[in-house]
């Protein structure tokens, strides 16, 4: 079976996607797989691929139509096997506000916050009161509802800063999420299904050198330190893993995903789930796989194996 590594796209995360695609391609190539990498620059390229190719599609497209369920839906309709979660889970995970609502309904710990919408033409932005949220946490996180790689994210500590933060978020989406800032440590958990059971790979703690874990900190060598496995008690680790698996199941994810959290003391707080996480040399998923005793290629093979049964 030939594997097609799909990468590129046309959004803010195009360069990251190309790097992910190259890493995945090289890993499959090292394992002797028949593999080809395709740069899908737009949806026209995607339609052409789906209509003419046979084999297995490994999706390394981040954001936009490559991650939000549209590509997955097209592949499902074409009955072409592909990696990772099906279209419904991808759409839900990509919409941070919708995902948070699902997590809250399941009783999982999430930040307090609200959704804001871009005003229509000729209308002034409606700036909601945020005094109670600021009093609760001292800072707020403002981010596009449907974006990744920390694109368009701002952290503010005064109410007058909200308008500019929303304007930045609205450059990337017409909806934004305003949440209380959760202090503490930033952690992430890769969930991998084996024989249909979701299992957690070792937890990674993310330690940016300065500021928060923004686009530059993620993809600039030396800007961030990582600790895998993260240092925490057995009880806290068990709770983090429980939340990660519950979040994975709540959205209906399949094969694998990355679950991001904050750890305030011993209290985990769920932030989001990534159904097509980064796979670059600096990315978190390959790091977790290595810590679990797997090569990157072995991890990818496990993803393919499970994806073929979804």
Image: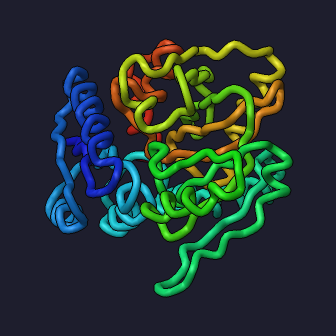
Quarter of the figure with residue 240:
top right
> What x and y, as percent, mark residue 43?
24, 66
Q: Is residue 70 left or right of residue 96?
A: left
What residue is shown at x 62% (from left), y 23% (from top)? Answer: 203
Q: Is residue 282 left or right of residue 115?
A: left
Picture layout, residue 76 above or below residue 93: below
Quarter of the figure with residue 76:
bottom left
> What x and y, as percent, mark residue 272?
61, 47
Picture layout, residue 258 above or below residue 124: above
Q: Nearer the viewer, residue 292 or 68?
A: 68
> What x and y, as percent, mark residue 10?
26, 57
Q: How is the image coloured?
A: rainbow
> What x and y, as percent, mark residue 153?
53, 49
What residue is shown at x 51% (from left), y 83% (from top)? Answer: 120
Q: Is residue 205 left or right of residue 84?
A: right
Q: Nearer the viewer, residue 250 or 20?
A: 20
Most extreme residue toward the front is 160
Q: Nearer the viewer, residue 221 or 261?
A: 221
Q: Is residue 217 visible?
A: yes
What residue is shown at x 23% (from left), y 49% (from top)? Answer: 55
Picture layout, residue 164 above or below residue 137: below
Q: Quadrant of the N terminus?
A: top left
Number of residue marks: 0
Most extreme residue toward the bottom is 122
Q: Is residue 305 visible?
A: no
What residue is shown at x 64% (from left), y 61% (from top)? Answer: 97
Q: Nearer the viewer, residue 223 or 67?
A: 223
């Amino acid at each position: 079976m030939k594997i097609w590594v799909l990468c590129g796209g046309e959004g803010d995360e195009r360069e990251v996607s190309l790097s992910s695609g190259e890493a995945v391609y090289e890993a499959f190539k090292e394992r002797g797989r028949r593999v080809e990498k395709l740069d899908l620059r737009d949806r026209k390229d995607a339609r052409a691929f789906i209509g003419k190719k046979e084999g297995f599609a490994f999706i390394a497209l981040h954001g936009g139509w490559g991650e939000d369920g549209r590509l997955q839906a097209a592949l499902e309709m074409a009955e072409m096997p592909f990696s990772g979660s099906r279209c419904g889970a991808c759409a839900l995970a990509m919409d941070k506000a919708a995902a948070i609502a699902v997590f809250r309904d399941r009783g999982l710990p999430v930040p307090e916050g609200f959704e804001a919408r871009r005003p229509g033409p000729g209308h002034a932005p409606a700036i909601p009161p945020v005094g109670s949220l600021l009093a609760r946490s001292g800072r707020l996180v403002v981010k596009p509802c449907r974006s990744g790689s920390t694109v368009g994210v701002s952290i503010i500590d005064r109410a007058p800063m909200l308008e500019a933060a929303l304007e930045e978020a609205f450059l990337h989406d017409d909806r934004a999420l305003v949440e209380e800032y959760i202090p503490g440590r930033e952690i992430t958990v890769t969930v991998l299904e084996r024989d249909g059971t979701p299992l957690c790979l070792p937890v990674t703690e993310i330690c940016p050198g300065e500021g928060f874990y923004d686009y530059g900190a993620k993809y600039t060598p030396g800007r961030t330190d990582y600790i895998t496995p993260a240092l925490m008690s057995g009880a806290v680790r068990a709770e983090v893993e429980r939340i990660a698996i519950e979040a994975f199941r709540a959205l209906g994810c399949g094969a694998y995903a990355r679950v991001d959290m904050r750890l305030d003391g011993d209290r985990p707080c769920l932030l989001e789930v990534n159904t097509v996480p980064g796979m670059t040399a600096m990315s978190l998923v390959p790091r977790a796989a290595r810590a679990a005793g797997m090569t990157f290629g072995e991890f990818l093979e496990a993803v393919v194996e499970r994806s073929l049964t979804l």
